[in-house]
Image (cartoon, rainbow, N blue to C red):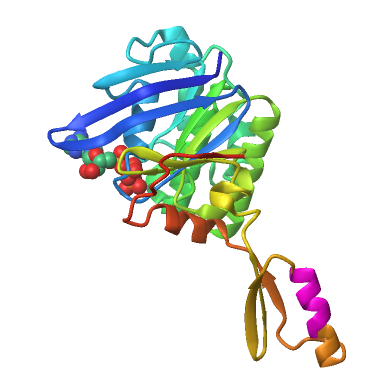
């Protein structure tokens, strides 16, 4: 069975259909990213899978267990980095991470985890003295301290500087190599592209597209745009176009670029107001 199995998931708040019929299967060891605009239903979905929110309809299994009936043993196999973290302002980083380690039967070494999130130099500092990005790294440390089999990360790198984000990506890749199943939400499309085996774009509580980030929404087969100083064409044969331009210019083509649609362009098209007539699509 998949590590995460979701069928027909629904969650309503009054007349708001926050989650409106989501199906997902995430394999063991897969890194899966949920993308979507503010209010699309990502956090609601993730919190239901974590066992922190009830659902109105649908079937959910995480490591074979219904999160609506969590057991202590199941909790110890799940790691969570919530969107909003609890405050433990007066503890030091090392005290807090050690404290959390005691809750887990297979906890990792706290100092090793602190090093992995790049906080060794801050280990003796109180949480309240840390910057926003440093606090977020503490949240990530607490999410992985218990050696989870499934790790949920809700916008984990918000507030990270570029170097910290790259370091976080390395940590996620290492965890994935160790076989950890990872479900993350993010607003950074380059993060989804760098990390995820598959992404789902959620809009209005539904999956608008699901697939490999390299091919999502027909990216790989889309026409290339060849641009140069003085012109631009869309073509299926960019190499031929570049050869013709090189001949025309007698060598170097000034200002030459060849591009295909970025994940961001595809994403913006997918979440645009007019609904796609074909509905959800799996693009591999
Ligand atoms: N406790 C609640 N009570 C009422 N409405 C809620 C509640 N939680 C979420 N909602 C609504 O459900 C919808 C989905 O919210 P959710 O937080 O899941 O979106 P999201 O995709 O995670 O957004 P963001 O990117 O801003 O985090 C929104 O319209 C939100 O206002």
Q: Is the magenta stretch mostly helix, strand or loop?
A: helix
Farthest residue toward the front? 277
Position of 159 with respect to 229 (left or right) is left
Q: Which residue is drawn at 59% across and 49% down?
A: 193
- Give the image quadrant in which the ligand numbered 1 is located: top left
Q: Which residue is drawn at 57% across and 38% down?
A: 198
Residue 14 lies, in percent from the top left, at: 12, 33
Residue 158 lies, in percent from the top left, at: 44, 51
Query: Looking at the rendering, which quadrant does residue 236 occupy?
Result: bottom right
User: Per the image, is 240 magenta?
Assistant: yes
Disc tally is: 0
Quarter of the image that includes the N terminus: top right
Q: Which residue is drawn at 67% across and 89% down?
A: 229
Position of 148 with respect to 238 (left or right) is left
Q: Residue at x 66, y 38 (%)?
A: 173
User: Per the image, is 28 magenta?
Assistant: no
Front-lying residue, 219 or 30: 219
| Vertical side of 233 occupied by 264: above or below | above
Residue 161 lies, in percent from the top left, at: 53, 58
Position of 111 with respect to 77 (left or right) is right
User: Does residue 159 show up?
Assistant: no
Residue 226 lies, in percent from the top left, at: 68, 75
State the extent of the magenta-drawn residues as a range: 238-245
Front-lying residue, 57 or 196: 57
Front-lying residue, 74 or 66: 66
| Vertical side of 164 occupied by 106: above or below | above
Quarter of the image that includes the C terminus: top right
User: Does residue 3 show up?
Assistant: yes
């Amino acid at each position: 069975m998949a590590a995460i199995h979701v069928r027909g998931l629904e969650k309503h708040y009054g007349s708001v259909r926050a989650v409106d019929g989501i199906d997902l299967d995430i394999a063991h060891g897969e890194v899966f990213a949920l993308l979507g605009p503010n209010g699309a239903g990502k956090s609601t979905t993730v919190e239901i899978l974590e066992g922190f929110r009830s659902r109105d309809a649908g079937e959910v299994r995480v490591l074979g267990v219904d999160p609506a009936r969590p057991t202590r043993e199941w909790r110890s196999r799940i790691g969570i980095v919530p969107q909003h973290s609890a405050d433990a302002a007066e503890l030091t980083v090392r005290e807090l991470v050690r404290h959390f380690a005691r809750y887990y039967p297979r906890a990792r070494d706290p100092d090793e985890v602190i090093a992995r999130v790049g906080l060794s130099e801050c280990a003796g500092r109180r949480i309240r003295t840390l910057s926003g990005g440093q606090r977020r790294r503490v949240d990530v440390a607490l999410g992985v301290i218990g050696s989870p089999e499934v790790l949920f990360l809700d916008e984990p790198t918000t507030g990270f500087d570029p170097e910290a984000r790259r370091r976080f990506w390395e940590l996620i890749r290492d965890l994935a190599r160790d076989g950890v199943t990872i479900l993350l939400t993010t607003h950074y499309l380059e993060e989804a592209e760098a990390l995820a085996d598959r992404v789902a774009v959620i809009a209005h509580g539904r999956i608008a597209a699901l697939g490999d980030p390299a091919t999502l929404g027909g990216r790989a087969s889309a026409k290339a745009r060849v641009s140069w100083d003085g012109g631009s064409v869309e073509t299926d044969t960019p190499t031929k176009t570049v050869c013709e331009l090189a001949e025309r210019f007698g060598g170097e083509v000034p200002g030459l670029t060849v591009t295909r649609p970025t994940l961001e362009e595809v994403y913006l098209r997918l979440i645009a107001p007019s609904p796609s007539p074909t509905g959800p699509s799996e693009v591999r």
